Amino acid sequence: MLMFGVILASSGLLLMIEKGILAEVKPPPLHPAAGELSRRGGGGGGGGEEAPGDLDYEVLRDIRNRTIRAVCGQRAMPRSVWELPAGQRRTVLRHLLVSDKYRFLYCYVPKVACSNWKRILKVLDGALESVDVKLKMDHKSDLVFLGDMKPDEISYRLKNYYKFIFVRNPMERLLSAYRNKFGEIKEYQQKYGVEIVRRYRKNGNSAGDDVTFSEFLRYLLDEDVERMNEHWMPIYNLCQPCAVRYDFIGSYERLNADADYVLERVQSPSFIRFPERQSWYKPVTAETLHYYLCNTQRRLIKELLPKYILDFSLFAYPLPNITSEFCRQ
Ligand SMILES: *[C@@H]1O[C@H](CO)[C@@H](O)[C@H](O)[C@H]1NC(C)=O
Ligand SMILES: *[C@@H]1O[C@H](CO)[C@@H](O)[C@H](O)[C@H]1NC(C)=O
């Protein structure tokens, strides 16, 4: 019931975005207030000339900020982590990583460069010598999770620390999770793949290593968002952007510039740079996304969108274009 209202409200906002809410948004000032704008590539930006894209990005950030305020301002939405049901609170507190030295909280979202951020945290903490150390990432050791602290310690940090997350187009994130986990990771094929095939394929019997994207989406349709694996749980549930008022929302689409901005903002030592993409990393390109979306039943994608609608709307990502016109291209 509650969720229904929220979805209605946010798809209203979504419609506004699709129809060009841009026209209603006041143009941002040409010289944003100090500290508001990310560091320009190459340190340029003098002389009053905007680098292309920067103004668009300011507008996007403004839309995100307004949407979050509008949606989170509704009566049914949580205003602090203490208002959340225990299970939801546990999830978000387990995803908030703490740096006491630099006084920030980072909510990690799998498939949005979270390994690199974890590396940075370890380097900042002195547990790792450099972000480039070629070691398999240990996702637990040498990290401090907010959920391991006492309530008053948690409240203090939520109130006083700089809080940020990084977000990504929800469809791209799902596709990335699908290709990585079901294409490459045995443990996932066994833990989830076997069951997915059993459920959704006639005479389904497999080692779980041949799950199709459609089968994966059908599985997501049947799963409860609050119990999903973190690699496909909506960002809204992982990071609770209404209960936690983030100071900054970075975009995967601008990863390096936004990461630099955050590192500067928390005053990390200048020798710490956000790592380059791993060489083995296979990015999801527009062509790949097009291929998967257009080879999936449209009905399936449409039915799945409500589950991720808050990720689309709060972070201002357009809904996937699955018109036959687009798919003919
Ligand atoms: C939204 O805008 C407010 C006021 O300008 C600012 O304090 C806040 O950090 C912004 N939030 C995000 C996520 O950008
Ligand atoms: C979808 O893609 C087609 C073809 O590129 C385009 O004409 C159409 O305007 C797009 N629709 C939306 C809603 O973006």
Image (spheres, grey):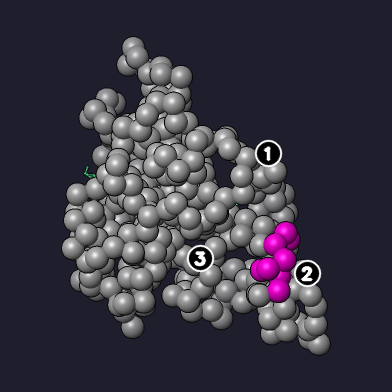
Return the residue at label 3: 230
User: Visible in this render: residue 111?
Assistant: yes
Closer to the eye: label 1 or 2 = 1
Q: Earlier in the sequence, mark 1 or mark 2?
A: 2
Identify residue for label 1.
279
Per the image, the residue denoted by label 2 is 210
Looking at the rendered structure, the kind of residue marked 1 is Ser
Q: In the image, is 223 to the left or to the right of 323?
A: left
Query: 10 Å neighbourhood of mark 2: few (<14), some, or many (≥20)?
Result: some
**Sequence order check: which comes first, mark 2 or mark 3?**
2
Q: Earlier in the sequence, mark 1 or mark 3?
A: 3
Residue 288 against residue 278 in the figure, above or below: below
Please report the bounds of the magenta region as a residue range: 183-190
Q: Is residue 37 above or below residue 3?
A: above
**Residue pictured at 52% horizontal, 56% vertical:** 139
Name the amino acid, label 2.
Asp
State left or right for residue 220 relative to residue 82: right
Q: Mostly what secondary structure, the magenta segment?
A: helix
Q: Residue at x 23, y 54 (%)?
A: 157
Q: Is residue 285 visible?
A: no
Label 1 environment density (alpha carbons within 10 Å; few <14, some 14–19, many ≥20): few
Mark 1 close to ligand 1, CB under 8 Å: no
Q: What element does badge 2 sit on?
A: loop
Residue placed furthest toward the bottom? 203
